[in-house]
Amino acid sequence: MGYAVYITRKKHWSDQEGPVITHTEWMSYVQTDRSLRLDMELARRSDPEVAARRKEPTHATWTRNMDAAEKSIDAVFWMDNGNIVADSPSLQARIKLFLIADGLQAKLEGEKGEIYGPVGAPETGRTRLRKDGRKHRWWQFW
């Protein structure tokens, strides 16, 4: 596994409490976005709970060029703990994830707490980390 980014409504993606993206919301979004499709085979291979039919599939594949004769998968997104997750997404995939986050009234957050903007890069000043890599204390604003 590489570096994950999360579409989340929580204060921090790893929080156990807080507002979540529901399975219904994610499935509705996948159905309305023509560049996304639910990938049952990938979901079954990736999650034994889905394969055993104890859990609903959430894996969606993203294909950037829908008009191409040869459609290739550019990224895979899935749900985990009320978040949408992508592992080591490309710049284009991070831009797509930002658009999905916007559509779900959520934010795009890296696993270290950085907040990604519309150009697929972390936004300056919108992170839970200081320049030295440590978390800000709750009372620090700079």
Image (cartoon, helix red, strand yellow):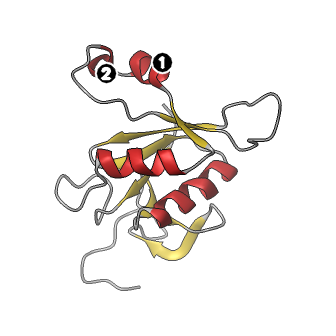
26 versus 100 height, above or below: above
- Percent across and percent down for residue 5 are 47, 50
Q: Tell me which label, 1 or 2, sits earlier in the chain.
A: 1
Relative height, residue 72 to residue 44 (above, below) = below
User: In the rendered image, which quarter is residue 54 located in?
Assistant: top left
Give the SS element for disc 2: helix
**Residue found 83% across the figure and 30% down from its top:** 69
Residue lying furthest left: 17
Q: Position of residue 107 (x, y in %)?
A: 43, 65
Q: Look at label 2 and name its amino acid.
A: Val
Residue at mark 1 = 41
Q: Is residue 5 visible to the viewer in this orientation of the structure?
A: no
Q: Secondary structure at mark 1?
A: helix
**Residue drawn at point x = 48 percent, y = 45 percent:** 30
Residue 142 lies in quadrant: bottom left
Q: Position of residue 3 (x, y in %)?
A: 51, 42
Name the residue: 23% across, 55% down.
15
Foreground pick, 131 / 119: 119
Residues 137 and 17: in front is 17
Q: Which residue is mark 2?
A: 50
Mark 1 Cα-neighbour bin, 10 Å: few <14, some 14–19, many ≥20:
few
The amino acid type of the residue labelled 1 equals Glu
Q: Quadrant of residue 47?
A: top left
Instruction: Give above or below for 107 relative to 35.
Output: below
